[in-house]
Amino acid sequence: VMNQVTVQTSKTGANAPTVEWKTLPWRQLEAKVFKLQTRIYRAEQNGDVKTVHKLQKTLMRSWAARCLAVRKVTQDNRGKQTAGIDGVKSLTPAQRLQLAQNLSLSDKSAPVRRVLIPKPGKTEKRPLGIPTMTERARQALVKLALEPQWEAKFEPHSYGFRPGRSAQDALRAIQQATQQKAKYVLDADIAKCFDQIDQSKLLDKLDTFPSLRRQIKAWLSAGVIEGANWFPTERGTPQG
């Protein structure tokens, strides 16, 4: 697929894809990424950590995954018109191609922009952290690599934030589990859960390879911008 994209080098040395964004072979790109994700999933099931990390690196370097990550944050996501600290709300097709061409892991991250949204039925507001478009694309790329590994680890009856699963699926599972006899139900909420996560323990739990660990650590510790002020993020993960 990479061979279908012609790249020209300008006098400044910047690589600029000449193919149009809308002409990219999206089904082929999706198939290539899915094939790599399936291999990651199976390697994790087999306990082959070395192969998992090798395949994750291959996926994140691939042209297919980089294009899909950029498409996800610039076209598919509901919050695609929300700007980070750089004020960028949208990208032209040419800019999307350029972002995909340059997308890679980094040891640094721009801070997120703090936005407060109301909680339903409460006066308290929920803080969201809005990354820049570039950081969102990087995060989408990393998600493509990490998700199949962790899907192989998760419990079969967990439904939150998992691909192809919804609240309706959880309800159906509850109905099936309670059809034969009554069951106890625990309804619990961890106060300010995302705000209190221990970042070091989270990184240790991920147990990933060094360059990806450095990237995720950079996201966690990048801080937030609220108004004209920067605040450190020594604990927790930004929601949003």
Image: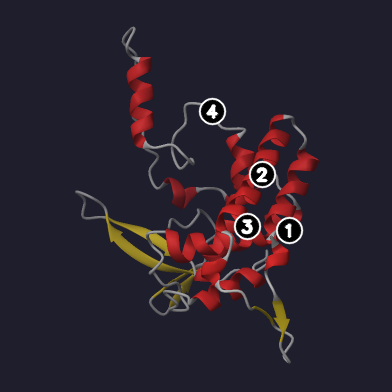
**Residue type pointed to by label 4:** Glu
Mark 2 or 4, nearer chain start: 2
Would you call the spot at circle 2 few (<14 residues within 10 Å), some (14-19), or many (20 or more)?
few
* Numbered mark located on residue 155 in the image: 4
185 up-or-down from 6: above or below:
above
* Numbered mark located on residue 166 in the image: none
* Numbered mark located on residue 35 in the image: 2
Residue carrying label 3? 65
Number of the front mark, 2 or 1:
2
**Residue type pointed to by label 1:** Ser
Would you call the spot at circle 4 few (<14 residues within 10 Å), some (14-19), or many (20 or more)?
few
Q: Gap between marks 2 and 4, in whole Å?
A: 23 Å
Mark 4 or 1, nearer chain start: 4
The residue located at (70%, 59%) in the rendering is 62
Mark 2 or 1, nearer chain start: 2
* Numbered mark located on residue 211 in the image: 1
**Residue type pointed to by label 3:** Ala
